[in-house]
Amino acid sequence: MKKVLNIVLRHLLLMFLAFIWLVPIVWLLVTSFSAYPGRNTSTFFPEEWSIVAYKNLLFSSDSVAQFPNWFKNTFIIACFTCVISTIFVLMVAYATSCMRFKMRKPLMNIGVILNLFPGVLSMIAVYFILRTLNLTNTHLGLIIVYTAGSGLGYLIAKGFFDTIPASLREAAYLDGANEVTIFWRVVIPMSRPIIVYTVISSFLTPWMDFVYAKMMLNSGISSQWTVAIGLYNMLDKSLINTYFTQFCAGGVLVSIPISILFVIMQKFYVEGVTGGSVKG
């Protein structure tokens, strides 16, 4: 009886937490279908339903709302960041897991310690360095910001590589393979879960980031903005009563690619996380 009561209480708690978590998401979704363009806090559900917000956002761009441009900019930045960051992370993880060299452990410790500090602490220095190189207000500069330190996030990938039997690499060594061949022909084909995990994590960073994007793309040219900056601009007090419903629609549209990616790759994502946590 006590066991059943514990299970019931646990599920009630989970249902309560799920309700709290889902309410803002449901409100954002239903508000995006409101016929009223501004904020409406008097009712949870819209009094009149319409898809005009989606239509205006996608097909009627103006000087304020340029969602197709923002989406394209964010997608390009995220794709380049994803590819470069994934390569960096996997290469550093392979070097620290499968190779032995001087200063290996001190370098690993330094990488872990640096990860303890939030990236925003260096944002002022990063901004002035990139401004000196004329890379502010460019998508290239933003890609550099996202990818430059990505190799420091090697730890989970290293833990996964530690689970790959060393005998496979040793057999490749006996056949005359070098480190590059072993990395691409032996280790990478066996590492699909951690690759998927790294790809998703690398893609999410620029897709959801606001702080660095706002700092770097500060020229005021809205066509260069990312989705995060553009949607945030819609919440300006002079614009919110005209564009709030479009803001909600943009939030829904931004979540769709990530949701699809997680649904398709969920199995490999979970395997990558659990596999990377087996060893340090």
Image (cartoon, rainbow, N blue to C red):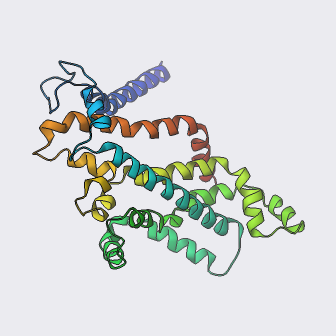
Query: What is the x, y in percent for residue 215?
Result: 28, 64
Query: What is the x, y in percent for residue 62?
Result: 22, 43
- Please tell me which residue lies in front, 84 or 96: 84
Seen at 43% across and 21% down, the residue is 8
Quarter occupied by residue 211: bottom left
Q: Can residue 134 be seen in this view?
A: yes
Quarter occupied by residue 66: top left
Seen at 37% across and 40% down, the residue is 254
Q: Is residue 280 visible?
A: no
- How many marks overall? 0
The relative height of residue 103 versus residue 181 in the rendered view (above or below) is below
View extreme (left): residue: 238
- Please tell me which residue lies in front, 159 or 59: 59
Seen at 68% across and 58% down, the residue is 161
Query: What is the x, y in percent for residue 119?
Result: 37, 65
The reply, left or right, for residue 276 in relation to residue 132 is: right
The relative height of residue 30 versus residue 72 in the rendered view (above or below) is above
The relative height of residue 275 versus residue 213 in the rendered view (above or below) is above
View extreme (bottom): residue: 102
- Please tell me which residue lies in front, 134 or 19: 134
Quarter occupied by residue 28: top left
Seen at 10% across and 45% down, the residue is 238
